[in-house]
């Protein structure tokens, strides 16, 4: 499956700008949110927009819907439409209207061609965090497979998305495995075209190397500020998470300490070994030098002694010979 960008540069810039605006607005108004669907998959697999995706997906909790509703004028002033999806395309009321604050919301630009972001309303159901909207609660790509385990959400952690960060569940891998299958990191699929409002019935295709690229974000959204984790109301999950972080840090520290200790031990052993080796080498060198020197000295001494002895012997022999010759000469004379 070769990378095929279904968005042009202007559209991707608009979507990045919208997601950055949503993040800043919700964080500044104390509304916890987390990315889901294609946006979560894009943040984990591409660190940005998926080449074949065309919208944003976030979740907020049902208790925070009144806060979101109060932000409608603010979004309007900033050039965006924030609306609650209470009616279908034919104007008929949706099933979610029978349950307060359960309908899915939508955020988009005021331009008819603007891309948008779905805001799913979530609620706790035992150990599950599931969709409050009846339609999504029973959908195959909603509450049936893509609900969240409560232990996998908090504390929310920042994920790189283009050139800024968005909040997501602490354990995205397990959720993606459950929602998209264990092959989510090697296969791609387009299910819905938000620009036409139609299901595409796309089939899974193997991703090529270029499919893991992402659309380049605009420089206007650049924000390297890495916010801390976002906890829930009772802070229990953050306490647990921070405890796990401390344990990991302590484990790393202990590992580094043990590594340094072993390194020092090995270094000392190696140093002693090298020292002994050098000492033996120096000793052998010195011994050979001394031996040669001593040998030459002894050799000279012996040579001198032998030379003197030989000289004396020769001298005596010559002396005797001369004496005899001289004696004979005198004897003949007289």
Image (tube, rainbow, N blue to C red):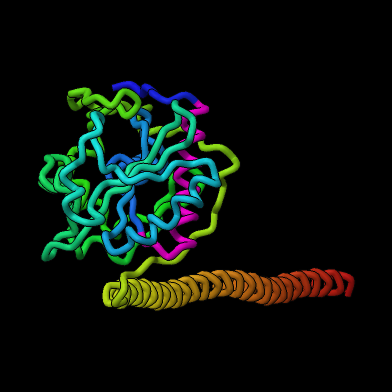
Residue at (35, 42) in percent of width and height: 106
Instruction: State left or right for residue 5 relative to residue 232.
Output: right
| Foreground residue among 4 and 28 | 28
Residue 293, position in %: x, y?
Answer: 64, 72
Q: Is residue 20 magenta?
A: yes
Residue for point 12% across, 40% down: 140
> Does residue 311 appear to the left or right of 127 in the view shown?
right
Q: Does the magenta segment cover residue 140?
A: no
Work out whether residue 247 can be spotted.
no
Residue 278 lies left or right of residue 49; in this view the side is: right
The mark tally for this picture is 0
The single residue placed furthest to the front in the displayed view is: 92
Of the pair 150 and 293, the residue shown nearer to us: 150
Residue in the picture at 43% in, 49% down = 160
The quadrant of the picture occupied by the C terminus is: bottom right
Picture coordinates of residue 101 (x, y %)? 25, 56
Range covered by the magenta-colored residues: 9-32
- Residue 110: x and y in percent read 48, 34
Question: What residue is at 28 percent from the left and 64 percent from the top?
Answer: 63
- Along the line of sight, the residue nearer the viewer: 145 or 98: 98
Examine the rendered structure and indicate whether residue 58 appears above or below residue 93.
below
Residue nearest the viewer, comparing 315 with 175: 175
What percent of the width, then of the height, locates residue 237?
27, 72
Examine the residues drawn in magenta and state their main secondary structure. Answer: helix
Say which quarter of the image contains residue 38.
top left
The answer to whether residue 248 is seen in the rendering is: yes
The image quadrant that residue 307 belongs to is bottom right
């Amino acid at each position: 499956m070769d990378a095929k960008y279904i968005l042009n540069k202007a559209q991707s810039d608009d979507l990045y700008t919208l997601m950055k605006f949503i993040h800043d607005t919700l964080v500044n108004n104390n509304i916890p949110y987390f990315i889901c669907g294609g946006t979560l998959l894009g943040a984990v697999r591409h660190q940005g927009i998926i080449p074949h995706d065309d919208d944003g997906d976030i979740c907020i909790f049902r208790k925070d819907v009144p806060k979101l509703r109060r932000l409608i004028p603010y979004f309007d002033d900033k050039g965006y439409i924030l609306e609650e999806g209470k009616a279908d395309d034919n104007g008929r009321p949706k099933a979610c209207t029978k349950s307060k604050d359960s309908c899915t919301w939508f955020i988009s630009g005021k331009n008819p061609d603007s891309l948008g972001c779905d805001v799913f309303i979530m609620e706790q159901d035992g150990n599950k965090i599931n969709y409050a909207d009846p339609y999504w609660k029973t959908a195959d790509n909603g509450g049936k497979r893509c609900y969240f385990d409560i232990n996998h959400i908090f504390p929310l952690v920042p994920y790189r998305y283009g050139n800024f960060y968005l909040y997501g569940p602490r354990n995205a891998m397990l959720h993606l495995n459950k929602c998209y299958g264990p092959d989510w990191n090697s296969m791609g699929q387009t299910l819905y075209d938000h620009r036409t409002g139609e299901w595409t019935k796309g089939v899974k295709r193997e991703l090529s190397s270029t499919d893991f690229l992402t659309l380049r974000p605009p420089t206007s959204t650049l924000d390297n500020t890495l916010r801390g984790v976002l906890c829930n109301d009772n802070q229990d999950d953050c306490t647990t998470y921070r405890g796990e972080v401390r344990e990991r840090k302590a484990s790393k520290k202990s590992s580094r300490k043990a590594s340094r200790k072993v390194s020092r031990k090995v270094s000392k052993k190696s140093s002693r070994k090298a020292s002994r080796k050098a000492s033996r080498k120096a000793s052998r060198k010195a011994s050979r030098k001394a031996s040669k020197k001593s040998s030459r000295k002894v050799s000279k001494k012996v040579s001198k002694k032998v030379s003197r002895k030989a000289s004396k012997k020769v001298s005596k022999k010559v002396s005797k010979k001369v004496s005899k010759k001289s004696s004979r000469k005198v004897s003949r004379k007289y």
